[in-house]
């Protein structure tokens, strides 16, 4: 309740301060996403005293154990608030998240990387597998995160720590410079979940990759033509209505007719 009240106060300050309102107005989305994040951080920094946060988190990316310790130091703030405040310390792209006993996200805050949706299922992630293998212990591993049921994005250095007296787990993930192990930026993206345009001449279909890439050519199999990068060109066709020569990517469900003439 305190967080919600302060978050709404943040909106009031944002929208009644000309300098802040003008700055957001210059963004493509009129600053809606940034305003929400700023109001979250505004509320979190009021509820979590800066000197206490600095004592527990330091000045760089915190460990999951440090986030748990901060939760114990500020009982007046919810665990979700502590997660938001801890994410301010991320020194590289990453996440701070709170997962329940079922591996679902209860709260999260991210920097650089796409945020983890509240309620999203993270049970397929490498870090959750490590948590389940060593219940009640602090674990760390390299892990991706789940978006819409698909593991995607960069593989991050990840640490998980249990919250004493609960069934909750705090997770801190970052692409580099984490305190629990030597870590340097080594970009590695999951092979699923991104969009790809078929490079085969005569196709050009755009689709989301949901299967491993071909071991020979390293390219995904197109969901329309069924080929990866190993095959040759596809035959074009002449539309029976407009008489233009079209690629297979322009074909409609009606044989011999392009999608513009349907």
Image (spheres, helix red, strand yellow):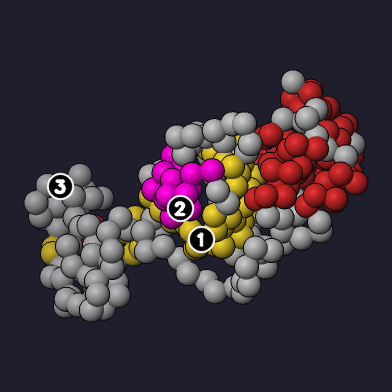
**Label number found at residue 130:** 2
Badge 2 vs badge 1, beta-carbon distance below 8 Å: yes
Q: Is residue 43 visible?
A: no
Residue matched to label 1 = 141
Quadrant position of the N terminus in the picture: top right
Given the current orientation, which residue lies at the most extreme top position? 1
Quadrant position of the C terminus in the picture: top left
Residue matched to label 3 = 253
Tell me the SS state at disc 3: loop
Left or right? Give the position of 33 relative to 14.
Answer: left
**Residue found 74% across the figure and 44% down from its top:** 69
Tell me the SS state at disc 1: strand
Between the C-alphas of marks 1 and 3, the distance is: 47 Å
**Label number found at residue 29:** none
Q: Is residue 51 visible?
A: yes
Viewer-nearest of labels 1 and 3?
1
Left or right? Give the position of 222 relative to 206.
Answer: left
> Which quadrant holds residue 223?
bottom left
What residue range appears in magenta?
120-136
**Residue found 62% across the figure and 38% down from its top:** 163
In the depicted view, which residue is nearer to us: 248 or 142? 142
In the depicted view, which residue is nearer to us: 165 or 184? 165
Of mark 1 and mark 3, the one earlier in the sequence is 1
Badge 2 vs badge 3, beta-carbon distance below 8 Å: no
Of mark 2 and mark 1, the one earlier in the sequence is 2
Residue 141: x and y in percent read 51, 60
Of mark 2 and mark 3, the one earlier in the sequence is 2
Viewer-nearest of labels 2 and 3?
2
**Residue found 28% across the figure and 68% down from its top:** 213
Left or right? Give the position of 101 relative to 61.
Answer: left
Please tell me how crowded label 3 is: few (under 14), some (14-19), or many (20+) other residues with Cα within 10 Å: few
> Which quadrant holds residue 22?
top right
């Amino acid at each position: 309740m305190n967080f919600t009240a302060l978050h709404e106060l943040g909106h009031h300050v944002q929208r009644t301060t000309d300098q802040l309102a003008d700055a957001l107005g210059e963004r493509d989305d009129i600053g809606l996403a940034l305003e929400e994040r700023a109001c979250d951080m505004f509320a979190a920094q009021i509820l979590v005293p800066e000197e206490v946060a600095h004592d527990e988190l330091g000045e760089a990316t915190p460990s999951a154990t440090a986030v748990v310790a901060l939760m114990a130091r500020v009982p007046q703030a919810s665990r979700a608030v502590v997660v938001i405040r801890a994410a301010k310390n991320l020194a590289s792209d990453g996440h701070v998240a709170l997962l329940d006993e079922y591996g679902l996200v209860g709260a999260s805050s991210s920097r650089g990387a796409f945020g983890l949706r509240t309620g999203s299922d993270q049970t397929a992630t490498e870090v959750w597998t490590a948590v389940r293998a060593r219940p009640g212990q602090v674990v760390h591993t390299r892990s991706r995160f789940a978006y819409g049921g698909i593991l995607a994005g960069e593989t991050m250095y990840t640490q998980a720590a249990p919250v004493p007296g609960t069934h909750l787990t705090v997770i801190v993930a970052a692409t580099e410079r984490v305190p629990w192990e030597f870590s340097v930026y080594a970009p590695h993206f999951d092979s699923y979940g991104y969009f790809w345009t078929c490079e085969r001449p005569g196709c050009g279909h755009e689709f989301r990759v949901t299967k491993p890439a071909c071991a020979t050519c390293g390219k995904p199999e197109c969901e329309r033509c069924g080929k990866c990068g190993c095959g040759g060109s596809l035959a074009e066709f002449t539309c029976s209505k407009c008489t233009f020569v079209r690629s297979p990517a322009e074909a409609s469900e009606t044989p011999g007719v392009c999608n513009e003439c349907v």
